[in-house]
Structures are given as C-alpha cells and as structure tokens.
Image (cartoon, rainbow, N blue to C red):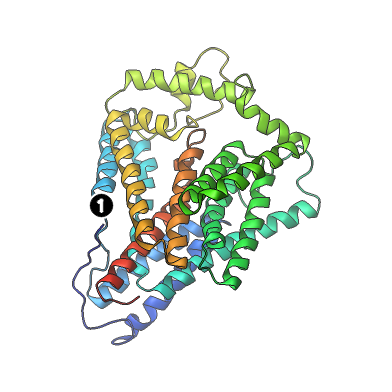
C-alpha cells in the first residue's frame, strides 16, 4: 500500500500571493458543503463538487504543484474507466452511453479526499462534518415522524426518495458505529457517536427498505467480526427483537424478503431473467451505459409491466451494460478496494480515530455491496457519491499512517 505525490514546492498556502492563502480555506469550505449536501440536495451537491474541482485545480496552479496522490487503486480505476469507454464506443446508443458514463468522474472524489486530508485534524474535521450532517438530517426525519408524517403503511423519505434516504443512512450509520465500539474512543466522542448512530438507525428503520436493512445488518456483522466477535450475539438478538416487535407494515416487508411470490420479488426475478438474455446477446462489451427500459420490455417475459430502466442488481447491470470486459474490470476494482481498505484497517486498528474511520469505511463497502444485490445503488448519484467519499477517507487514513511511519506529520 503506497501513496506518492509530486515534488513539494517551497511556497505553501500560508505564504505568497493572496490566492495561495485564500484558495485552501475556500476549498475546505466548499468540501464541507459538498459533504453536508449529499444528504440534502443533489443539485447543491453537484454544484459543490464542480466548485471543488475548479478550486483544487486553481490551487495547484497557484502552488505550482501537482498534489493528486497516486493510490493503490489507480490501475483498477483505469481498467474500469477503459471498460466504460469501450462499451460506449460499441454501444447501441453511444450518445446516451457517453452522457451516462460520466459517472466515472465521481471517482475523482476518492482522489480529492485521499490527497487533501494531509493531517489528522483535517481528517477529524471532515469526518465530523460528514457524521454531523447525517445525524442532523436523521433528526429531521425523526421530527417528521413525530409531527404526523409519514403515516401508517408509508415509508420515510427526507430530502430524497425513501430508498435513497435508506441507503445514505445505512452508509452513515456504518461509519458512526465503530467509534462507539473502539475501546480507546474518548467518552465524549463515544456518546456523540452513539447518539448519531441512534438517530440514523431510527431513520433507516422508518424507511422500511428491505435492501438497506440487510445491508446495514451485513455491515454491522462485519464490524463485529473484525472488532470483537462477542458483539455478534447482541447484534443477532437485536435483529430478532426488531422483527418480533415490528409494526404490522414493517413486519410484512421483512417477511416478504423470503417470499419469491411477493410482487416486488417476482418483478426482480423477471428483470434478472431478461437481463441474462440481453447479456447472452451482447456478452463482450455489453449494450453501453444506457437506460435499459426498451430492451427489458423486448426481452422480458409476458406480464412484465415495463416500469424499470435498470436491473436492480449492480453486478448484472454492469454485465449487461459493459459486458464481460466491464464485469471483469468492475470486479477487479471492487476487489482492490476491499483489499486496500482491509490493509489500511490492519495498519491503524489500534488508533481509536483512524481505526474507526478505516473500519467504518470497510463496513460501508460491505453494506454497499449487499445493497447492490437488489438495487442499482451504483447508479444512484447520491449513494455512489457517499460510497466514493468513504473510499477516499480510508485512503487518507492509510496515507497519514505512512507519513507517520516515515517521520511525517501525524
């Protein structure tokens, strides 16, 4: 696990022309808006992401230094981007594929946080903004419940569709929980982490989203298995209690997970069957990163309602849109992310803050993958954005560890 950056110049953000002093502060502020807005507004979040890119580029020009670090994931990212490019060139609708495949630009989020978080205080402030924002939004969701909405047999969405809210809360919850469990966490921070995790858990529960439930459970099992296997028993007990004492509507949703005849499950099975047929006809480079609505209506069994434009499964969606080439590239990319995040955690596990960030990022990866078994979460910009943030945070932790080991700033 090695991180490299270009040669440092003598001029830093605290000296030289005003741009070199103002731009770092502006860039930090915009990055905080970016983190907070992922839970609130995709428009604000996209605008903040664009401003981040512009400010960072201007800062590098002002400092005359290329400050984007190399990471262990570079070749894996390059392979995935290449697969997107090939699929677009060969796509049945290449213009649409070119537009949709801009999702690869979100990978830049990883490099931003891995490169810009060059000190432990900066990392702590960033994580604080992220978890504080998610806790505040979760509190809004709880207040919405207490003031009469949503009603019975409805599902809580705060600023987004309820599924997006659920996935965002799932990732944020898994980032917060390790702080509450690490034996070295200061009491005040532990209380704050427990409070935030509680708010997120209640809001997640109120979304009544089965995939996010399973994803959160998988992430919590990952945390327990890695941090302290004795925690597996209380997690199991908690899951059983939540099922036994669930309100009727939630209970019905939970029981439907194993009912293959449930309308939503039957619809997904129909989608997946159609997806396999499409893949069989386009096995090498896929059909391109496009809306699959027309193809699904053509390939699906009779009775399919034709309401979906994606396959509700990340792996199959990638196979159909990017073919075997993209499937191999995506598998390699996700595999390298898992290996890298595990290595980072092993290196920093004893540090209460860095270890918790690393474990939370690893658990978020597990949750994201489990959620992707029944949802196209990789295609949901807000969810994909938060996922890439967690990868960037893990790489930042690894980079700080290497700097500390080399005698750099801790």
Q: Is residue 257 above or below residue 194?
A: above
The answer to whether one can see residue 156 in this image is: no
Q: Residue furthest left?
A: 7
For this view, does 36 lie left or right of residue 314?
Answer: right
* Residue 394 in the image, given as x and y percentages of width and height: 39, 58
The answer to whether one can see residue 152 in this image is: yes
The C terminus lies in quadrant: bottom left
- Tell me which residue sits at (39%, 41%) in the image: 100
Secondary structure of the residue carrying tag 1 is helix
Q: Residue furthest top?
A: 302
For this view, does 6 lie left or right of residue 100?
Answer: left
The N terminus lies in quadrant: bottom left
Q: Is residue 16 above or below residue 229?
A: below
* Residue 339 in the image, given as x and y percentages of width and height: 33, 48
Q: Which residue is mark 1?
A: 74
* Residue 93 in the image, given as x and y percentages of width and height: 35, 31
* Residue 29 in the image, given as x and y percentages of width and height: 47, 72
For this view, does 2 lie left or right of residue 190?
Answer: left
- Tell me which residue sits at (34%, 28%) in the image: 287
């Amino acid at each position: 696990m090695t991180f490299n950056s270009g040669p440092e110049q003598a001029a830093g953000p605290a000296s030289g022309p005003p741009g070199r002093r103002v731009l770092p502060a502006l860039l930090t502020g915009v990055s905080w808006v970016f983190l907070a807005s992922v839970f609130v507004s995709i428009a604000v979040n996209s605008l903040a992401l664009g401003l981040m890119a512009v400010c960072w580029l201007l800062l590098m020009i002002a400092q005359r230094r290329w400050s984007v670090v190399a990471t262990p994931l570079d070749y894996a990212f390059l392979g995935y981007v290449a697969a997107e490019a090939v699929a677009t060139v060969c796509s049945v609708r290449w213009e649409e594929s070119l537009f949709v495949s801009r999702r690869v630009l979100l990978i830049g989020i990883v490099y931003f946080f891995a490169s810009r978080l060059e000190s432990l205080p900066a990392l702590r402030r960033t994580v604080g903004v992220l978890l504080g924002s998610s806790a505040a939004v979760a509190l809004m969701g709880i207040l919405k419940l207490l003031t009469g909405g949503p009603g019975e047999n409805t599902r809580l969405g705060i600023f987004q569709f309820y599924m997006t809210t659920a996935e965002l809360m799932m990732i944020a919850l898994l980032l917060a929980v390790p702080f509450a469990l690490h034996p070295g966490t200061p009491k005040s921070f532990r209380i704050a982490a427990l409070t935030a995790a509680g708010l997120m858990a209640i809001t997640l529960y109120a979304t009544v989203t089965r995939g996010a439930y399973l994803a959160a459970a998988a992430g919590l099992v990952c945390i327990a298995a890695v941090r302290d296997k004795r925690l597996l028993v209380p997690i199991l007990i908690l899951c059983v209690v939540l099922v036994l004492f669930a309100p009727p509507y939630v209970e019905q949703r939970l029981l439907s997970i194993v009912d293959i005849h449930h309308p939503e499950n039957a619809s997904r099975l129909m989608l997946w069957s159609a997806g396999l047929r499409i893949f069989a006809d386009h096995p090498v480079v896929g059909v391109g990163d496009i809306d699959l609505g027309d193809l699904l209506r053509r390939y699906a069994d009779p009775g399919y309602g034709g309401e979906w434009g994606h396959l509700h499964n990340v792996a199959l969606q990638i196979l159909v849109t990017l073919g075997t080439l993209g499937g191999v590239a995506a598998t390699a990319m996700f595999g390298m992310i898992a290996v890298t995040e595990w290595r980072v955690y092993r290196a920093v596990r004893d540090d209460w803050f860095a270890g918790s960030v690393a474990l939370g990022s690893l658990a978020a990866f597990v949750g994201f993958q489990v959620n992707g078994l029944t949802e196209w979460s990789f295609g949901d910009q807000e969810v994909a954005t938060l996922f890439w943030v967690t990868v960037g945070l893990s790489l930042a932790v690894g980079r700080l560890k290497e700097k500390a080991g080399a005698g750099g700033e801790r």
